[in-house]
Amino acid sequence: MFKCRYFNADDDLNPKAVKLLAQKLAKFHGLDVPIPKDSTKNTMKLLFEEWLGPEDILSFKEGVVYEEIQKQKLQAFKEMDLLAEMAWLRQVVVDLNSPVVFSHNDLNRKNILVVKGDENNNQNLDLYLIDFDWSNYMYRGADLGDYFANWCQQ
């Protein structure tokens, strides 16, 4: 019987686990799924225009988020123009001209299962990507960004 667990920060430091994840992700990105490939336009809109609605932006400028920034003395956030940062990031994504591939789009640790057939070593290590609710065509860097945004965090 195989036991599985979620990918964790220790796995980030295990070259075999990271190599296997990269191989699985490359294979996933190579899939030719028969769905519209122009979904990046919709996802980009979601990421850059709908993710932060007007009430969120207002909260950042003068509401609960603003108050927390003041309370915690987060100087970098006090000086940040969130809308300008988002516009810059969107332009960088477009300028990179990254390949559009079939992407997981929710590549967090809870969506990577680690299976070890032998608890004494890594010889039978295997990984499985799960939870494909958000999967569609997107820039290849989206999944890589998800992974590195959480790298080695507990």
Image: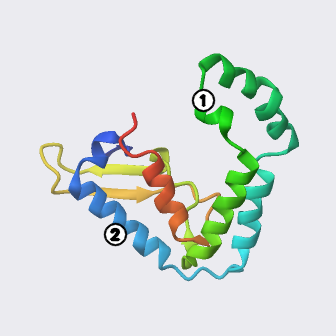
Considering depth in this image, is 72 or 75 the residue closer to the camera?
75
Q: Which residue is drawn at 17% across and 52% down?
A: 122
Where is residue 110 drawn, in percent x and y? 48, 44
Q: In terms of sequence position, does the residue under pointer 1 or pointer 2 come before the other?
A: 2
Where is residue 116 drawn, in percent x and y? 25, 49
Where is residue 14 drawn, in percent x and y? 23, 50
Label 1 – label 2 distance at C-alpha: 40 Å
Q: Is residue 12 left or right of residue 64?
A: left
- Quadrant into which the C terminus falls: top left
Amino acid at dot 2: Gln
Query: Pointer 2: what residue?
Result: 23
Would you identify the image quadrant in which residue 36 lies? bottom right
Q: Residue at x 71, y 65 (%)?
A: 44
Residue 135 visible? yes
The outermost residue toward the top is 71
Q: In this view, does 8 lie to the left or right of 47?
A: left
Query: Pointer 1: what residue?
Result: 75
Considering depth in this image, is 104 or 99 the residue closer to the camera?
99
